Structures are given as C-alpha cells and as structure tokens.
Image (cartoon, rainbow, N blue to C red):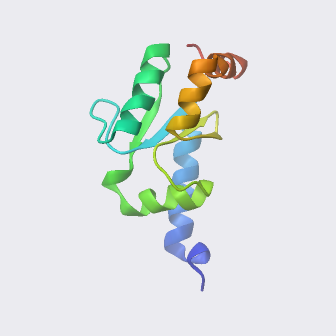
Amino acid sequence: MTAATTPQASSTHDRIAAAVASQDVVVFMKGTPQFPMCGFSGQVVQILDHLGVPFKGINVLDDGDIRQGIKDFTNWPTIPQIFIKGEFIGGCDILREMFQSGELASTLAEKGIAA
C-alpha cells in the first residue's frame, strides 16, 4: 500500500480539502494569524491584513500530518501556502509579487472577495 492510498493519507487529504473549501481565503502557515511563527507566514499575514482580507489561518505546527500533507496536496515544498476560493495560489514570494504588482487586489476582486 502506498502512502497516498493509506487511510491516514486519505483522511489528511480530506481534512485539507475541507479546510480549503471552508473559507474564501485559507493560509496554511506556521503559527496563527495573531502569532506567526516564521517570517514568511508573518509577511503573508501582513499583506492580507493590509488589504483587509478576512482569511482562515491553519497552524501546521499543531499537526504533523497536515504539515506534510499540505505539501503533498499541492506538490509545493514550502509553507505558508495560500488558497483563494479553493485555488492554490502559491507561497509567500508569489503572494508578495502579486501584491506588489496589483495582481492580488485584482484577483480578489475578480473572485468577489472584498479587499
């Protein structure tokens, strides 16, 4: 049985999928929006807060299965990971570039998310 087909992996995948679908903007991060535990997570929180975007932060440090599972879910090696309306956007660098170019504000507007 491969890791992708084990009950634990499937359960983790389902939990991640449910979390991604639970709110318009979801950030898998180290720490919480109130207390980010790494600089990259902190930058993401600052950008979203600056735009006034409500988001759900999921602390991967609280759950090792989620911490690894989100990397497998997106095939993206780093955290934080940002989702907008269920679509994986990328990590801190991509969000920062989108913010600086104005693309983030337009993407949020296109998806009907007030910023």
Residue 23 seen by the camera? no
Quadrant location of the C terminus?
top right
Residue 55 seen by the camera? yes
Count of labels in the image: 0
Where residue 82 appears, x then y in whole percent? 54, 38
User: Residue at horizontal 67%, vertical 18%?
Assistant: 112
User: Residue at horizontal 47%, vertical 23%?
Assistant: 48
Where residue 69 appears, x then y in whole percent? 50, 61
Left or right of 46? Residue 25 is: right
In-front residue for pair 89/17: 89
**Residue at the limit of the structure toward the bottom, as seen here:** 1
In-front residue for pair 110/14: 110
Quadrant location of the N terminus?
bottom right
Where residue 81 appears, x then y in whole percent? 52, 43
Vertical side of 111 occupied by 63: above or below: below
Res. 22 image quadrant: top right
**Residue at the limit of the structure toward the right, as seen here:** 110
In-front residue for pair 98/13: 98
User: Residue at horizontal 57%, vertical 61%?
Assistant: 72
Where residue 91 appears, x then y in whole percent? 53, 41
